[in-house]
Image (tube, rainbow, N blue to C red):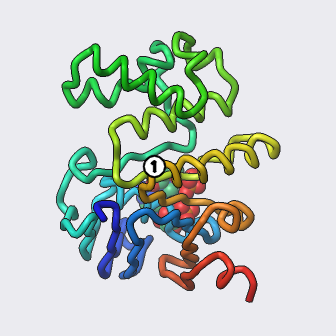
Amino acid sequence: GNGAIELIAVSKYYGSTIAVKSIDLKIPAGAYCCLIGPSGCGKTTTLRMIAGHEAISEGDLLIGQRNVTELPPVKRGTSMMFQNYALFPHMSCAENVAFGLRMQGVSPVERAERATEMLARVHMDMFADRKPDQLSGGQQQRIALARALITQPEVLLLDEPLSALDPFLRARMRDELRRLQQDLGITFVHVTHAQDEALALSDMVVVMEDGVIRQKGTPEEIFNR
Ligand code: ADP
Ligand code: ADP
């Protein structure tokens, strides 16, 4: 599949800090993979290297069997949803969602159609004309999801997507994320420090510690031993 990810001896240095130490990792296409581990272990750096927002110091990254190590983010078939949602405050929800298509040169009519369709997918079609500051945290998060997915990526990268939500909303959004991933059939890579999240969501858990991978397996293998 096009959404398979392979990291081959990937390292990241920040000056003398080794954030990620020669990791090897294969994530199958269509998997829901959670990256877990304590703060500072290299989760976000790994995610950002897959996205192309952070250069790889050493090693190779394949996405869908293509070596994308040197490619910019927009050429990788990936999309990233950020922790703080990062919506444009002056744009309506529909405009926020359609933004990525504007960058791709898609016509205004098609942009509007696809934005409407994507808003419905995340149950936000009623809020198309609102500005982000007129929405709750959970609603803003749905808009951010729709915005990340509208370019039809093979891989969605999520950095602590649920951490800003209250416990009730977290549980609900967790279920929605899982359903969305199964519906779309694309690869999700989700960074979290919450074990319950990884257990509920993933097909595959990768445990990092000190810049290396300590364990990988199904949630059952990782948490029930
Ligand atoms: P996590 O996401 O698991 O909390 P990070 O990937 O953010 O961990 O960080 C891994 C290590 O790399 C930490 O020691 C962190 O301080 C360091 N680091 C991350 N980003 C930078 C940066 N831009 N400059 C210098 N050091 C960084
Ligand atoms: P998270 O908790 O999600 O891993 P952080 O709060 O650690 O995020 O980091 C937020 C931003 O600061 C990131 O862009 C990261 O690369 C950068 N950063 C993290 N640690 C350092 C550091 N030691 N020096 C410089 N920048 C850092």
User: Is 9 on the left-hand or right-hand side of 148?
Assistant: left
Relative to 138, say whether 96 is above or below. Answer: above
Percent of width and height locating residue 195: 71, 67
Q: At 34% across and 53% down in the image, what residue appears?
A: 154
Relative to 52, say whether 79 is above or below. Answer: above
In the picture, which quadrant includes the N terminus? bottom left
Q: At 57% across and 12% down in the image, what residue appears?
A: 130
Judging by the rendered image, the residue that carries numbered circle 1 is 184
Percent of width and height locating residue 165: 72, 41
Corner quadrant of residue 5 = bottom left
Percent of width and height locating residue 60: 24, 73
Relative to 72, say whether 37 is above or below. Answer: below
Q: At 63% across and 61% down in the image, what residue appears?
A: 201
Q: At 50% across and 32% down in the image, what residue appears?
A: 86
Q: Which is more toward the observer, 111 or 88?
A: 111
The residue most toward the right is 168
User: Is 157 on the left-hand or right-hand side of 177?
Assistant: left
User: Is 39 on the left-hand or right-hand side of 47?
Assistant: right
